[in-house]
Amino acid sequence: MPEPETNQTMRKKVIVGMSGGVDSSVAALLCLQSGHEVEGLFMKNWDEDDGSEYCTAKQDLEDADHVCRKLGIKLNHANFAAEYWDNVFQEFLREYKSGRTPNPDVLCNREIKFNVFAKYSRMLGAESISTGHYARLQKTNNEIRLLKAHDHKKDQSYFLQAVSQEQLKNVIFPLGKLKKTEVRKIAKKNDLDIHSKKDSTGICFIGERRFRDFLKAYLKAKPGKIVDEKGTVLGEHQGLMFHTLGQRQGLNIGGKKGAQEKPWYVSEKSLEENKLVVVQGNKHPSLFSRSIYLDSISWIGPKPDLPENLAVKVRYRQADQNCILTKKGKGFLVRFDELQRAVTPGQWACFYSGDWCLGGGVITSVNA
């Protein structure tokens, strides 16, 4: 069994972020087996809908408590809902209101898990924190590098791209060298009942409810026209915020203007005219981008000398895409070696050099 990766080999007090899932549970177990003094901390980041059919927080807390009792460690509780609302959810709403499609998980890591959570853990006497992320850390010449997990299919460095080197200084990622199947086996071998618990998916505060219903509770929907490239009206949308580039489902314009031959896809969201522009065919040229523009980039370590040939992901689970990153005005221009489909403003572009995650930023526009 691999040892958790630590910045020092000495025994430490480690606070592990316990979510009630198998990954954080095994992270706590491995920290214990490495000889550290371990406590768990269950974070509550969302105040609404506790106990409803959509929210699993109550069950997750029970699972985390059960695991900690099994491991013989203390489970602390903290409510960071106010910080989450101010620093993550409000930005989430602003992005949707501006017609973009945000990824709140990246901000949650930077603002909550490796900021508020870390500060609270230090108040509990922790020297390090640990999470169940699939990623690795490497210390080289007093520099902390964030590396992809050995299991590239589970790698979560994309979601950690905005976390600073300073924030990573006292962090342990015990799962970086493991595959998910190995993590479940370790949990089962150690009689942890959550070994077969289903992984959580989607955005944490939305749960299993319909995304459209959730968003309508916070933003006013403004219906508008659905048009083709020539401006011909094909139907009506219920709000631009309900759609994203490359989307096929939910347009409700089937059977119009040859739609029975080729499906329609969203190619543009015109905020000024409140129009949704659609094109036919999965390979339509309007769905592809040669370049993107970013207003800013958060570098984890030293800034690379630009221009630079790098790899980039413009969405989670995407294979690395070769690109050239250059400075342009006050921001950055990314030119892809190959055309990219359905690149979406509001999402994060994460840059890599091999397995080394350099950092990333929010996509401002496409084909800049």
Image (cartoon, rainbow, N blue to C red):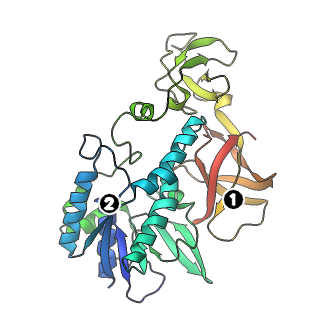
The residue at which mark 1 appears reads as 310
Front residue of this view, candidates 183 and 77: 77
Q: Helix, strand or loop at disc 1?
A: strand
Question: Residue type at mark 1?
Answer: Leu
Residue plotted at (51% across, 46% down) = 90
Q: How many labels were placed on the picture?
A: 2
Name the quadrant containing residue 290.
top right
| Residue 183 point in image, percent of width and height | 32, 65
- CB contact under 8 Å: marks 2 and 1: no
Name the quadrant containing residue 258.
top right
Q: Helix, strand or loop at disc 2?
A: loop
Question: Residue type at mark 2?
Answer: Ser
Residue plotted at (32% across, 67% down) = 41
| Residue 327 point in image, percent of width and height | 79, 55
Residue 182 shows in the view = no
| Residue 246 point in image, percent of width and height | 56, 32
Answer with left or right where residue 96 lies relative to residue 52: right
Depicted 256 relative to depicted 166: above or below: above
**Between discs 2 and 1, the one toward the N terminus:** 2
Answer with left or right where residue 35 lies relative to residue 127: left
The residue at which mark 2 appears reads as 19
Q: Nearer the viewer, mark 2 or mark 1?
A: 2
Q: Residues within 10 Å of mark 1 (few under 14, many from 20)?
A: some
Depicted 291 relative to depicted 87: above or below: above
